Structure formats: C-alpha cells, structure tokens
Image (cartoon, rainbow, N blue to C red):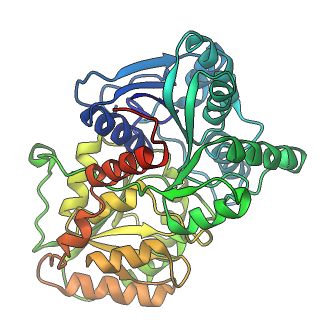
Amino acid sequence: MRILLLTYYYPPLNSIASHRGVAFAEIFTRLGHQVTVATAKKPRNAQTDLRVRPSTIEIVEVESAILTLLYRAFGNNQSRQFAPATRGSLLDRFRRARIRILTLGRLPDLFDLLVKPTKTILKSRSFDLVISSFAPRYVHEVASYLKASKQATYWVADFRDLWTQHHQFSGIPLFRHYEKYLEKRYLQQADLITTVSHQLADQLSEVTRATKVVVVPNGFSPRKDIANHQSPIDSSKTAYLVYTGTLYPGWQNVHLFLEGVAIWKKNKTTGRRLKIEFIGNDLSNLTAVVQEFNIQEYVSFPGLLSHESALAAQSQSDAQLFFEPNTGTGIVTGKFYEYLTSMSFIWRVGGAQTTEAKLIAEECGNGVDIGNDPVAIAAKIDQLTKQTTRIAPKIDHVRLSSYDRSQVVTEFARILLETFPSLTR
C-alpha cells in the first residue's frame, strides 16, 4: 500500500507532536507499506533536533520563502529563550497571541503558505491512502485536493487537537464561520477520521455524524538507553520534580502550583532539598511568577533539551508535573504517555474532576491528583521532602503496554484494511 503522510510536525522539529507522525511512518513501513512523508522544511539545530533512525521512508520537504524569513525573524530556533514578561503586560499578551496564531491552526494561518508548494511537489504522484494530521490546517486542504483530483484513493483526516471546538481558542469572529464550513467539508469528504481520545472522538462525531471516527491514542515508544544523558541527582538529599514540554499561559494552573511552593518554603522544616525544573522552549514567561513568589532557589528553566535528556530527567524525578488544561477534558497528549513510561509518579495539577488522562494514569498506577489548592500542594511537597529517598510507583505493565505505539499503529493498520478492503499490502 502506498501511503502519504501529510504533517507539519515531523523531525527534525523537536516537538512531542512529531512523535505521532514518526510512529505512523516507521510502523507502517515495518508492516510492509511504502510510506512518503510530506512536511515543511524547518531550520536545523544540532543540539536539540529530534533524530530518527535511517529507513526507507521517503521524506519530501516543502519550503515557503516567506515562512523561512519568519522562522529567522521570530524563531523556530527551539533553543531560544525569551526575556521574562510580567503577567498581563503587553509583551505577555503578544506571546499569548503568537501561540494562538502560530500553533493552534486557526485562521488566518501563515502555514497556508505551504498549500500551493505542497500540491506542486506532489502533482505527478498518486497514493492508495493519504493521512493528514491536523494542526496546522493546510494538511487537510492538500489532502482534500488530492482526494478530489483522484491522486489519493482514500483519505484519513487525523486530529491531534480539535479545530473549531478547540478548548483554548474559539477563533477570530471574522473567520470563525468560514472555519466551521471548511471543517464540515473536510470531515464529510474524508473516508475516515482519527483522533487521540474518546472524548475528542465524541465531539468530532457531533460535527460529522456520517464519517466514522476512530480513536488512535498517541501512545509511547519504548525508552532507549538514556544512561549517557543522566546527570547525578542524589535522591537521598534532593527531591526532584520536573516538567517537560510547552505551557500555555492562562490555560493551565501553573501559578497555583508555584504558590504552593511558596507556601511550602514559608513553613518548611527539615527534609530533603527541593529541585524543580521546567524543561522546554519559551517557558521564561514563568520567570516573573517565580520571582513574585521568591522561590528562585528551587525553580529553574534549563531551556529546550534534546529528547534523550528530557527522558532522562523524567526518569530521575520523584514526580513529573502534569498541568492539565482547565477546559478540554479529552486532551491526552503524547507528552502524557511519555510520562507514563518514566516509572515516576505523575502529579496532576488542575483539570476537571474526571478526565481521560486522569483515568489512564490511575489505571497504570502512577497518577496522583494533587488538585488546585496551593495549601494542599504545599502539604504534598512537604510530604515528598520528608521521604528519605525516591519511591517508585507500582506500575500495571499489562495496562501500560496497551499504549505502546507498535500495538497502537498495528491496530490502526488492521482497522484501515478492514474499513477499506480494496487496499493491498
């Protein structure tokens, strides 16, 4: 079967979203299919680029001159760190707007500049199946064109996040109705819709009603040897908490957690030292909050690290911080599944009382709900520092293994062949 994967998020881009595309491409290839990946050309960074194993996967990189200029001006440089911005300041509001426009796939979308060059580079190609992974939106537009022009026999529209029902951004009024029209057209034209959780599947089903919606979890890849990336942390002397990934100001209760740290500091007695690291790109918007609570000696921002170094930090931690969004109960990110495999506890901060991610973490054995109350958070930190050493959770490995990407994508392939009997291996 000739498969085309349309995705912006793909290596070398060091983003958790890139791992979904890699899993699709590598495992479909392993199953004997011929895979082509069409993605955007991105700036390289030797220190932080996401690396993949050499394979027979065909990678087609599409370039937009305007986007290249914007990368250089505003930074797709993932190691870049920005100056602190006070909450509510003009700079802080600009950064929030930048996140909404450049990462959430809403119109007006600069990534639409990739539609024409992607169509052009694929003009003489044909595929049995095209999988387009949203966001950004341009991948669905290209897939729609390929299906209409009979260059693709079947189309699977994949949604890592929702579009018009997005939990973080309702869209710009001038474009909102047009987006709803486009979304409905794509969902009706696609032969199958996939998404990452059952709650998102239910929401997409309400929009399409006709096209079948299937859950394909983000899942995890088995951890490689990360011993060379580990820095020594003496767990008998230091309690280590870590967050890895992106944070969206105003949508996650990070400030309540940091307030809990401040309360703990005020009332702490004896125990292990506390070390908290926020590892990722452009997290310096939290610096002002850390300074406001005067907890700089406990909280640090190493910046974006290599994927291997981030995995090592997770594995060494007493607990990983998981700031679940205040809205959007069906969000189960790839980062969350990565946390599951670290053999450390997952401290869930915020979120609705019952979410899919919470249930999965509890079933696998490492989920701990510490809530939104800074006083309760301070008490949990105090309890942690009073422990004499790191305590590992009791993991249900059978339950956990069901989210291994090899199993997840192999089951996806079975569904495809069952849904489209004419497809051949």
Is residue 267 visible to us here? no
Residue positioned 41% across, 78% down in the render: 359
Residue 104 versus residue 5 in the image, above or below: below
Nearest the camera: 179 or 16?
A: 179
Q: Along the horizontal axis of the image, is 25 left or right of 255?
A: left
| Image position, residue 49 (x, y; %) | 34, 31
Nearest the camera: 142 or 33?
A: 33
Residue 70 versus residue 341 in the image, above or below: above
Counting labels gives 0
| Image position, residue 39 (x, y; %) | 50, 26
Dividing the image into 4 quarters, which one contains the C terminus? top left
| Image position, residue 31 (x, y; %) | 27, 37
Residue 56 versus residue 85 in the image, above or below: above
Is residue 70 visible to us here? yes
Q: Along the horizontal axis of the image, is 210 left or right of 68?
A: right
Q: Which residue occupies the extreme right position in the image? A: 174
Q: Which residue occupies the extreme front position in the image? A: 422
Residue positioned 23% across, 29% down in the render: 53
| Image position, residue 304 (x, y; %) | 38, 43
Image quarter of residue 401: bottom left
Q: Along the horizontal axis of the image, is 83 left or right of 224?
A: right
Dividing the image into 4 quarters, which one contains the N terminus? top left
Image quarter of residue 318: bottom left
Nearest the camera: 147 or 259?
A: 147
Residue 73 versus residue 131 in the image, above or below: above
Residue positioned 27% across, 56% down in the render: 404
Nearest the camera: 219 or 406?
A: 406
